[in-house]
Amino acid sequence: HLLYLAQIEPQLRSVRAMLQSGDAPQEPQGQQPIDALRQGIRFEGVGFTYADGLPPALDSVSFDIPAGRTTALVGPSGAGKSTLIHLLLRLYTPRAGAICVDGVPLQDLRRTDWLSLLAVAGQDVDLIEGSVLDNIRMADANASHADVLAAARMAGVAEFVEPLAEGFETWIGQQGHRFSGGQRQRLGLARALLRKPQLLILDEAMNALDGELALRIRQAIDEHLPACTVLVISHHADVVRDADHVIHLDSGRVVPPK
Ligand code: ADP
């Protein structure tokens, strides 16, 4: 399961770190199929503690992520944002309360079905030795060329790759082209978008982009994937101004906006 996640979300460092440390938690396997996110996700009194004796990383957390909308999750470092993503990715199970997807507890769903509906883009994007096309297509080896280009356009990749002499065939790697942090983030977004996710988790995925570009990419996502549910995670309240609603998290709890 972790290996699968590491393949589809290579930028998710926490997953790789768990794999490397052999600290892969064993969780029960649900059997209920799911092929779409229709109503939304509800966190109901969710509590989670990493180990006995530690303070809770999440404490009685309740909120909704309505399907087809953009929900922003904002909070300072240590607020519990990553923990919440780990629970959504089913790396861990809540110790209290429940996370329900269209009314079904997450742990009852068939895990591979659930993960196939998700994509995560993160702050740090690891590129592989290969062309720009290879780097995007690794998110879905069966994607058509047209789909890869569409994802690249949506994520603002085409505009900096097309002017290069070799365009999408530009080689990335030790002897290859070096992309900036912001350009790498855009490549990471293109990977995530190529999966045409039902739930797109943007975990500080645009913090190296200027505000205008980030807004343009978010608008392109709204336009091309209108049914996509977006969860934007950031410690900066101002990057999520255009979200449909904002959840503020602090010290593991949902708090009123400051
Ligand atoms: P954020 O992503 O908002 O910075 P985290 O979810 O990483 O917050 O952390 C929430 C709390 O859980 C913090 O107090 C953090 O120290 C603790 N924590 C996070 N990961 C672990 C872990 N693997 N083991 C123990 N405590 C952890």
Image: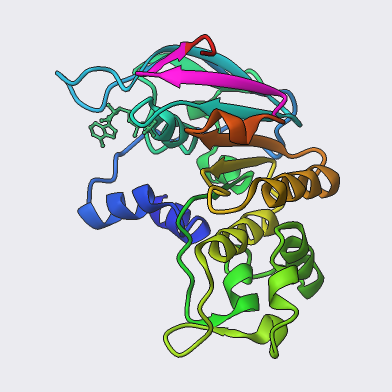
120 displayed left or right of 251: right
Q: Quadrant of residue 95?
A: top left
The residue depicted at 55 percent of the width and 48 percent of the height is 205
Instruction: Give the main secondary structure of the magenta stretch.
Output: strand
Which range of residues does the magenta coloring cover?
243-254
- Out of 237 and 56, give the one closest to the viewer: 237
51 displayed left or right of 178: left
In magenta segment, residue 83: no
Q: Is residue 180 above or below residue 197?
A: below
Q: Is residue 234 above or below residue 9?
A: above
Q: Is residue 132 above or below residue 101?
A: below
Q: Quadrant of residue 91?
A: top left
Q: Position of residue 4 (x, y in %)?
A: 46, 56
In magenta segment, residue 250: yes
- Out of 161 and 231, give the one closest to the viewer: 161
Outermost residue to the right: 223
